[in-house]
């Protein structure tokens, strides 16, 4: 048999795998959004490499949760809030949607704030870059098919290369990096624990679950093809958290070792310049711009999918505007409101972002428990129900996050 004949099945399999890659990688990449980059910058500048082991374990938790969401989307061809409405009733679905809507709006505002900050770091005025960005992400979804939108989002995911490069420019001690990733270090201090919770909360999100399940259903993935989607979820979570680790490494190797602590990603980029050179600052800013652009498209989509599923309205990027008026109308409204809020002079963005993060922290345990009940329901999932291992890991994660959320709320109101 000729070599070309032997390679043909392998080539076809590789092409099919590439066609299935998308939802998992996009969701994980969008998790590294503006608030996420800020969280990792704070962790790296304050605790050095000490958070790398947390990123490693968070990756496992994200794989468990996202795989469950993707499997439900493929086996039922329905989104998360659609299943919640059918299984638990309209009242529960509306409660979840209200929480998702408010928290997602605040987080979308944070993405446009990230676009504004990265633009100013690159010398572009926010009153120019924010409207252009809003128009681009709106036009992308309004005029594109699902596969066109997915390809563009995958291209935006390449922002990760900027953080890899900025970390390499920082010349870290790789021996220390590997040691910190392998050996857990825990400090029973308020700020350490809050930063750890923020790291978990910015990686495993309710909107991420809703978006991934809806996009898998929208892509019409069947269970015969699901093995490739599962691989997409695993690869996406792994690569997404590698990027998170490189942000921590970049800030730890430059800021932490020089005793510089930052509170925002913008401060981190500015502080990198005198230590690692102007290229490091620009790479950091470009990374934040790409991440914020990706998340500013994904977050409104997660919201519109959830709302339209719950009310039984037509939804999906492959539908025309006339067939899915509510879907595109809500998407447009979220983009416009978020962009306008960021452009209001002197508006305090921090309280809005803080509220969105608190709502995400409250919602996540509830969403996880609902997902567990759905994924174990034989009438819904049939033979594709959760395995025992998945149930154990997801339950441990839900309990841990619930306890951490209660501690966060107790600390906030004490």
Image: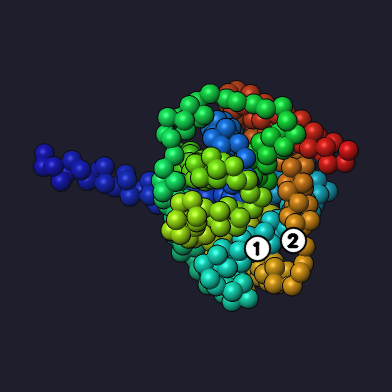
The quarter of the image holding the N terminus is: top left
Q: Earlier in the sequence, mark 2 or mark 1?
A: 1
Looking at the picture, tell me which residue is in the foreground, 11 or 407.
Answer: 407
Rendered residue at 50%/56% (across/down): 273
Horizontal placement of 366 versus 125: left or right?
right
Looking at the picture, tell me which residue is in the foreground, 10 or 301.
Answer: 301
Q: Position of residue 234 (x, y in %)?
A: 48, 38
The quarter of the image holding the C terminus is: top right
Examine the image and state in which quarter residue 338 appears.
Answer: bottom right
Rendered residue at 41%/42% (across/down): 171
Looking at the picture, tell me which residue is in the foreground, 166 or 37.
Answer: 166
Q: How many marks?
A: 2
Q: Position of residue 208 (x, y in %)?
A: 62, 48
| Rendered position, 186 above or below 260 | above
Rendered residue at 52%/29% (across/down): 180
In the displayed image of the protein, which residue is found farthest to the bottom? 128
Question: Residue under circle 2?
Answer: 349
Q: Position of residue 119 (x, y in %)?
A: 56, 67
Tags 2 and 1 in contact by the CB under 8 Å rule? Answer: yes
**Label 1 packing within 10 angstroms: few (<14), some (14-19), many (20+):** many
Horizontal placement of 30 versus 361: left or right?
left
Looking at the picture, tell me which residue is in the foreground, 93 or 397.
Answer: 397
Q: Position of residue 256 (x, y in %)?
A: 56, 41
* Helix, strand or loop under label 2: helix
* Real-space Cα separation, disc 2 to disc 1, in angstroms: 8 Å
| Rendered position, 115 above or below 43 | below
| Rendered position, 329 above or below 104 | below
Q: Which mark is residue 113?
A: 1
Q: Which mark is residue 412?
A: none
Residue 277 visible in the current orientation: yes
């Amino acid at each position: 048999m000729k070599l070309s004949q032997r390679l043909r099945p392998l080539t076809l399999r590789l092409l099919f795998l590439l066609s299935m890659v998308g939802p998992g990688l996009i969701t994980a990449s969008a998790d590294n959004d503006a608030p996420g980059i800020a969280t990792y910058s704070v962790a790296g500048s304050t605790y050095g490499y000490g958070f790398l082991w947390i990123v490693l374990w968070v990756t496992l938790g994200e794989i468990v949760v996202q795989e469950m969401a993707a499997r439900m989307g493929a086996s039922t061809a329905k989104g998360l809030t659609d299943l919640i409405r059918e299984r638990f009733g309209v009242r529960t679905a509306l409660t979840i949607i209200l929480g998702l809507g408010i928290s997602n709006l605040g987080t979308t505002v944070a993405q446009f704030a990230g676009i504004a900050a990265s633009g100013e770091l690159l010398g572009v005025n926010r009153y120019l870059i924010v409207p252009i960005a809003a128009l681009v992400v709106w036009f992308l979804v309004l005029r594109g098919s699902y596969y066109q939108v997915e390809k563009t989002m995958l291209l935006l995911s390449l922002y990760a290369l900027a953080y890899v490069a900025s970390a390499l420019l920082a010349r870290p001690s790789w021996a220390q990096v590997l040691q910190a990733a392998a050996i857990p270090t825990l400090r029973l201090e308020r700020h350490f624990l809050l930063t750890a919770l923020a790291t978990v909360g910015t990686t495993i999100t309710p909107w991420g679950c809703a978006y991934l399940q809806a996009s898998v259903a929208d892509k019409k993935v069947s269970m015969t093809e699901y093995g490739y989607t599962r691989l997409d979820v695993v690869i996406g979570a792994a690569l997404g958290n590698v990027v998170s680790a490189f942000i921590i490494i970049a800030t730890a190797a430059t800021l932490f070792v020089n005793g510089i602590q930052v509170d925002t990603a913008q401060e981190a980029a500015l502080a990198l310049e005198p230590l690692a050179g102007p290229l490091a600052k620009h790479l950091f800013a470009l990374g934040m711009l790409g991440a914020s652009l990706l998340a500013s498209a994904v977050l409104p989509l997660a919201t519109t999918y959830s709302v339209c599923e719950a009310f039984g309205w037509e939804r999906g990027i492959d539908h025309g505007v006339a067939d899915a008026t509510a879907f595109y109308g809500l998407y447009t409204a979220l983009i416009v409101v978020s962009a306008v809020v960021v452009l209001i002079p002197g508006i305090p963005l921090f309280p809005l972002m803080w509220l969105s993060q608190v709502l995400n922290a409250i919602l996540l345990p509830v969403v996880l428990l609902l997902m567990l009940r759905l994924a174990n329901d034989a009438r819904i999932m049939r033979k594709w129900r959760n395995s025992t291992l998945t149930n154990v890991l997801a339950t441990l994660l839900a309990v841990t996050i619930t306890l951490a959320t209660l501690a966060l709320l107790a600390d906030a109101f004490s």
